[in-house]
């Protein structure tokens, strides 16, 4: 791989669920949000809103719901802040999920490049039904019903260095046609 900061950040980012009891500075947070803002979206619709959550009462309310969808509840408690990625399907009816996903990944990479870490709490429920974890988290965060919650990213100073593998490129890549 070429010696390049972007490639290095992409390859070395890992999901971290244990955080140190250390803050994320306002400057770091601003850089992370800026990375989300510069994500691509269909026709540059930019259908996202990023909710920054620091309040411990709000976090506690989220944890009660989050433990239904992830084993990694402790990260939500320990992270000094969380960013919820909310999208507006009216602004982009066809590609709101992808838009939220690329913004979330941009922010995860930015956090990693600043010496921080994050993980993705997968809360989006394609069914869109009431009574899902997504619907309950939206309620806890005051998100209107027509908006969708794509991801919740706890962000903080990492207290672990997980190792994860990927499939070999030879398993993933085909040329010209699938078969
Ligand atoms: C859409 C999506 C949903 C995810 N949901 C969760 C989750 O609910 N809880 C969790 O601990 N990690 C979650 N993850 C993180 C994955 O487990 C992680 O990215 C994967 O195991 C690869 O590890 P790495 O990110 O450290 O390379 C999610 C990741 C994605 C992209």
Image: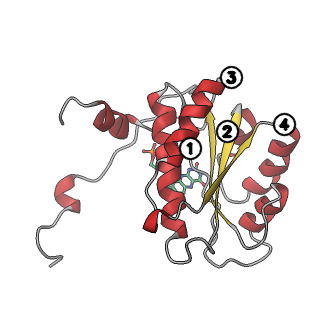
Judge depth for marks 3 and 2 and give the one in front. Answer: 3
**Residue 98 visible in the snapshot:** yes
Q: Is mark 2 within 8 Å of ligand 1?
A: yes
Q: Name the residue located 51 percent from the left edge and 52 percent from the top edge.
A: 103
User: Residue 88: x percent and y percent?
Assistant: 64, 67
**Marks 3,2: beta carbons within 8 A:** no
**Marks 1,2: beta carbons within 8 A:** yes
Relative to 158, does residue 126 appear above or below in the rendering?
below
Q: Earlier in the sequence, mark 3 or mark 1?
A: 3
Q: Earlier in the sequence, mark 4 or mark 1?
A: 4
Q: Which residue is mark 4?
A: 56
Q: Name the residue located 48 percent from the left edge and 49 percent from the top edge.
A: 105
Q: Which residue is mark 3?
A: 23
Q: Is mark 1 within 8 Å of ligand 1?
A: yes
Q: Name the residue located 50 percent from the left edge and 58 percent from the top edge.
A: 101
Q: Which residue is mark 2?
A: 75
Relative to 76, does residue 178 appear above or below in the rendering?
below
User: Residue 61: x percent and y percent?
Assistant: 85, 49
Q: Is mark 4 within 8 Å of ligand 1?
A: no
> Relative to residue 2, is residue 36 drawn left or right?
right
At numbered mark 3, what does the secondary structure look like: helix, strand or loop? loop
At numbered mark 4, what does the secondary structure look like: helix, strand or loop? helix
At numbered mark 2, what does the secondary structure look like: helix, strand or loop? helix
Q: CA distance from mark 4 to mark 1?
A: 19 Å
Q: Which residue is mark 1?
A: 119
């Amino acid at each position: 791989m070429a010696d390049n900061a972007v490639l290095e950040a992409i390859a070395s980012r890992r999901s971290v669920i244990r955080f140190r009891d250390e803050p994320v500075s306002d400057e770091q947070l601003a850089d992370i949000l800026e990375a989300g803002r510069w994500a691509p979206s269909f026709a540059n619709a930019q259908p996202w809103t990023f909710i920054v959550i620091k309040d411990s009462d709000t976090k506690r309310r989220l944890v009660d719901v989050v433990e239904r969808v992830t084993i990694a509840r402790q990260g939500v408690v320990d992270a000094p802040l969380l960013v919820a990625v909310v999208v507006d399907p009216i602004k982009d009816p066809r590609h709101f999920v992808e838009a939220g996903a690329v913004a979330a990944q941009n922010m995860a990479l930015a956090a990693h490049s600043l010496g921080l870490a994050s993980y993705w709490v997968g809360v989006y429920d394609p069914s869109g039904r009431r009574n899902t974890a997504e619907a309950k988290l939206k309620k806890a965060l005051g998100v209107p019903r027509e908006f969708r919650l794509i991801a919740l990213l706890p962000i903080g100073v990492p207290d672990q260095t997980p190792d994860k593998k990927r499939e070999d490129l030879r398993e993933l890549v085909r040329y010209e046609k699938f078969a």
